[in-house]
Image (cartoon, coloured by chain):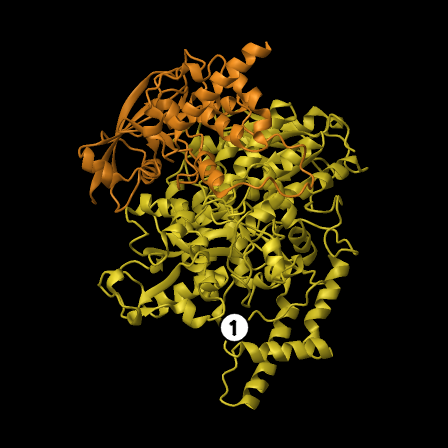
Chain colours: A orange, B yellow
Amino acid sequence: MSETVTIAVKRQDKPHGGSRWEKYAVAHEPGMNITTALQWIAAHPVTVDGKHTAPVAYDANCLEEVCGACTMRINGRVRQACTALVDRLLEDQPDQITLEPMSKFPVVRDLQVDRSRMFESLRRVRAWVPVDGYFDRGAGPQISQDAQEAAYPLTTCMTCGCCVDACPQFNDKSDFIGPAAISQGVLFNEHPIGRFDADKRMAVIAGAGGIADCGNAQNCVKVCPKNIPLVQSIAKAGRAATTYAIKRFFHA
Amino acid sequence: MANGTERVVVVGGGLAGLAAAMRLAEAGVHVDLISMVPVKRSHSVCAQGGINSVNTATRELGDSEWLHLDDTVYGGDFLQHQPPVKEMCDWGPRIIDLMDRLGVTFNRTSEGHRDQRRFGGTMYKRTAFAGATTGQQLIYALDEQCRRWEADGLIDKYEYWEFLGPILDDNGMCRGVVAQDMFSMEIRAFRAGAVVMAHGGCGLIYGRSTMSMICTGGAAGRAYKAGVKYANGEFIQVHPTAIPGTDKLRLMSESARGEGGRVWVPRKPQDSRDPRSIPEADRYYFLEERYPKYGNLVPRDIATREIFDICVNHKLSVEEGRLCVYLDLTHLPSETHRKLEGILEIYEKFQATDPRVTPMKIFPGVHYTMGGLWCDFEKDENSGGMLSGSPRNHQSNVPGLFVIGEADYQYHGGNRLGANSLLSCIFSGMFVAPCMQNYMASAGGGSADDFPASLFDGEVDRHREAMEALIKRAGDENPYLLHQELGDVMTRNVTVVRENKQVEETLSKIEEIEDRYARAALTDQGRWTNQNLSFTRALDDMIVLARVIAQGALQRDECRGAHYKPAFQIRPPDADDAAGMRRQANEWCDAFAVKNEKWLKSTIAEFTPDGPKFSYEAVDTSLIPPRPRTYGLKGAEIIEDVWRERLAGGGPGKSATESGKEAVTSA
């Protein structure tokens, strides 16, 4: 028998059912990550007590931390399972590793949650460039290297939900669109063509569930796996919201 | 035009599926978009390096769409029908322009234009890129546009829905699909005037690959079992540089070499010194030494084979118990490191080593399926490309069922060039839309609404019964462990080097796995979010396609692109004198002409309950006559000379061009 790692998973069979913890003794492999452990549990679905169980439901796709699917709470911290290396986790907490679903979204089953609210927020802030059509119209606008370098980090947002999971203002009682959507609003408001819709985006960002709901806890930026400067985006959005409000005041 | 109520089903929300959906929506067609994951999490996000097209900078140096076509078909060992490839290359500049307009954050020159880098298999810097996450940036742009159409009510997304099969009427025409909600497990029919399959590749047949977890081949297998032909299955691209991992192999983009990364091993086997302290003289830069012209940027199949050869035959692997070579970026300036930030971070995160200071350890991994569901095209005799709007384009042998993206087989022949996949996906998605509209407006198209509910209900019932049978199945086999066995044997025997004996053994093993699959039981019999069911069902499709791949590989007794069978390699000239070299080059060309006569054909597999039925179809090489692919081959120059003379003089080499002409009429 090879060396094993104890993985405790918070399980829930149905969206509104109760939850329970199950523990598994997972075979250790050098360099393994949490998705490897979940794959192992799927193939050997028996708890440490010898109870046969169903494979753990979870989202996963690229396993390269570019799709955002496998987000969950690992040892209490929200992050992607694919980049969570088991040996590193054991250094901090040697006895066991805990896996829980994200805390701000409805649980579908086990570690799988429904994050459609995030995509809905992207729709609300009109996170797209309003092109006339997809026919040939030549190249897009010239963009300076500095502008590209400023925009690029914002475009790496995977809509994984770490930022909103860590945000105290984002919950089922609030309508807050959250840092990711605000940052996308900023991204498109700064795009040479995207800015043509800036007022429409600002109507959402400055409106109910928008920037005013941010409590400036700055948790978002700490948990973002892509190091997106979310606080900076929020600050920009805040300033733009003020300008927008003044403009609205005089044109109302 | 299609009548206003006619809907289209798009299966798959990667680059190809989203491009098709947004183009159809723009034309006023209602789209039901079915995807196993939220489309923003599709496998296209994994493409790192870039997207190819001719551009103003390369044009200055003599580049053209024609040369892009030439590089693509030469790199693909002439197995592609050329009109679709020409059309794609012609569209390249327009596609990049459109992506630019959609806000993709392409890297910029100091004047603010798009920057380009060089990729494998070409001498030109054709590849536009957005950091090292080009695929992610492109799919986000399309995702955003589709969200816009969703807000306008023209696209309905069915995310977390799994395609179970097409619905065919009594005449064998496609009238919709059956799909399952992966949460509630509800199975329902989607009526459609036309369906387009954009489900991507099937790397999971190989167990661990660079592909994402949904790339099982499930959708491809289901379409194939329903009667869609599968073409060139044996052509599987093994990417030369992947990071070995316990759950998957992670891509290390070709852009690492495009930006100056060098591949090497210590000359002394398993040299235990820190790689940084090994002097230049003790390093073997085997790609640069063996291929002085292309160096580290030889096409993928060749780089893969060389790395394999160095580790397996020359036993020069960097590590003792594990096969790997160094991919070294440590000599590059920090500015270049910044351009590659995304991929360097991936390496650092997963390997816990900084590739800016320590050479990376990499090894080839299964990466792309050049083959796929068969589809047609119609040549435009004036341009040499595809006839715009023809309903034949991208339509499979099942009327009304179209195929695009990695799911199809049209663009990459025997081997895909780096940064051509993003182009082929977006292009085929954009291009197919009017073809589908014209199909729906044609006499045979008709409306799915004219068919009785019984057609759709019957199919739903059939899939529901199959699901119930699988849930209730008893047995002692574990689907996950069977999958590992399948992946291991396929990876060992049907990837880089193929020997008939081993491929035969693989086929027996697949048969054994198929038998055991009948006893694979679920550990989850529930009817809510049952991932165990979804995986086990897809395993059946993987087994079916594994047979197509392995049997196709067994039958194809030649070397072409990624399909490498040393026993059937034409011996390169090696005489000591010029006359002898010339004579041998002539013999080489004779053998090459004979080989093309027999094997310059698309492999076509059709499903039967007793296994695939194979046939071979001529390839349309009407634009560029096939010629020997001689990267790094000894005697390459003299072979090329002899072949050119034959083409010019209509000598024995003409057999290859003749088969091309033949193909034009039959394609």
Q: At x 50% / y 65%, what residue is drawn?
A: B564
Q: In this view, does A220 lie above or below B130?
A: above
The residue under the point 37% across, 48% down is B344
Q: Please state, as top left, top right, bottom left or bottom right, where the C terminus of chain B lies in the image.
A: bottom right
The residue indicated by pointer 1 is: B569
Specify the quadrant of the image occupied by residue B517: top left
Q: x and y percent of residue B70 in the render?
A: 63, 62
Res B216 seen here: no
Q: Mark 1 lies on which chain?
A: B
Q: Is residue A64 left or right of residue B570?
A: left
- In the image, B1: left or right of A32? right
Inspect this view and state whether residue A30 appears.
yes
The residue at the far left in this view is A95
Q: Which residue lies furthest to the front in this view?
A: A250
| Picture coordinates of residue B350, whole percent (x, y) | 32, 45
Q: Where is residue B436 in the image (x, y as percent from the top left)?
A: 72, 39
Q: In which quarter of the image is residue A63?
A: top left
SS for dot 1: loop
Name the one closer to the observer, B146 or A237. Answer: A237
Rendered residue at 56%/46% (across/down):
B113
Query: What residue type is disc 1 on?
Result: Gln
B150 shown above or below B100? above
- In the drawing, does residue B93 fall left or right of residue A221? right
Total residue callouts = 1
Q: Nearer the viewer, residue B362 or B593?
A: B362
Q: Which residue is drawn at 35% across and 28% down?
A: A221
Compared with B76, B218 (above or below) is: above
**How would you rate the neighbour count of disc 1 (Cα within 10 Å): few for under 14, some for 14-19, many for 20 or more?**
some
In the rendered image, residue B393, in percent from the top left (x then y), is placed at: 71, 47
**Which image quadrant: the N terminus of chain B?**
top right
